Image (cartoon, coloured by chain):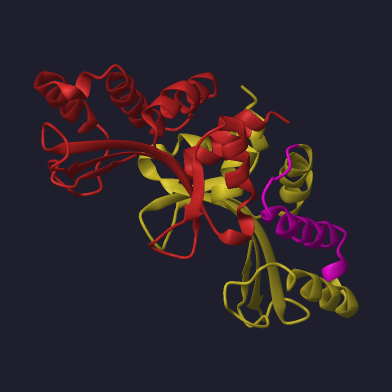
Chain colours: A yellow, B red
Amino acid sequence: MDLEAYLSGYADGEGCFCVTFNRSERHALGWDIRPSFSVSQNRERAQILELFQRTFGCGAIRPDRSDRTLKYEVRSVSDLVTNVIPHFRSYPLLSAKREGFEVFAEVCERMNRGEHLTVDGFALIAEIASGINRTGKKKYPRIEIKV
Amino acid sequence: MDLEAYLSGYADGEGCFCVTFNRSERHALGWDIRPSFSVSQNRERAQILELFQRTFGCGAIRPDRSDRTLKYEVRSVSDLVTNVIPHFRSYPLLSAKREGFEVFAEVCERMNRGEHLTVDGFALIAEIASGINRTGKKKYPRIEIKV
């Protein structure tokens, strides 16, 4: 069986391509942009998270603070651009979630080129990221943009 | 990409192999046993439900009564045994959900042979079905056994 296609199917249902904006004094422009790919699962079915980790060769599995599940998460922009995004280009999502993935990929690729470090680049990334389906929240004071 | 592996991955996260017992005057033994495979999804991402329906060549897509989602569902024992179960034997679930699937498959196969129509056969099927993870409920007055 094609494990990579399987994981894309799993991620189409359960995966989250997320861009979070947090206020941050440490960042020159006052904001920290954090893209992440994550998948959550009950502890007794954690095998699938290990398959993601092994296949992507990056990311961490940790307990989710909000409930009793485990979460596999890739936060490193470099890992996202090198490992995660190419996977979903080769084994694309088949639902409309794909459109959100494309926006997510563009945000990550621009950040990987350092574009978020300039005022114009940051503004553009914020605008692009707002194209990802939001879960009811507005603008980026601690927005979580999920797809 | 291997669509069948993709759908198994999707079902590993979002699919439900379910056996429901309902009191029924119409049935000789006073119970109606209903196995079903189902997948739910938001309306804007219904493509994936259509892929299941097309790939399995059976089942129906309908609005879910409980919320605003759509549900793809196969209820016919014959369709489950002929189309759905062989798919998940060829493209097996990779999480612990697989154990529940195997129990589900055994229930369907026994029903397909008419075993539920005898008292002994029914009792055995009820016992086997109780091996599927339950969502907190007990015995079969309107049990829904999900995996």
Quick one: quadrant of the N terminus of chain A? Answer: top right
Compared with A52, B42 (above or below) is below
> Which sits in the foreground, A45 or B40?
B40
The range drawn in magenta is A91-116
**Magenta region, mostly helix, strand or loop?**
helix
> Which sits in the foreground, B9 or B59?
B59
Residue A49 appears in view:
no
> Which sits in the foreground, B69 or B25?
B25
Residue at the spot 60% in from the left edge and 78% down from the top edge? A142
Residue B72: image location, x then y, percent: 50, 46
Residue at the spot 46% in from the left edge and 21% down from the top edge? B82
Residue at the spot 40% in from the left edge and 29% down from the top edge? B98
Q: Is residue B104 magenta?
A: no
Quick one: quadrant of the C terminus of chain A? Answer: bottom right
Q: Is residue A106 magenta?
A: yes
Residue B101: image location, x then y, percent: 38, 29
Residue A72: image location, x then y, percent: 54, 47
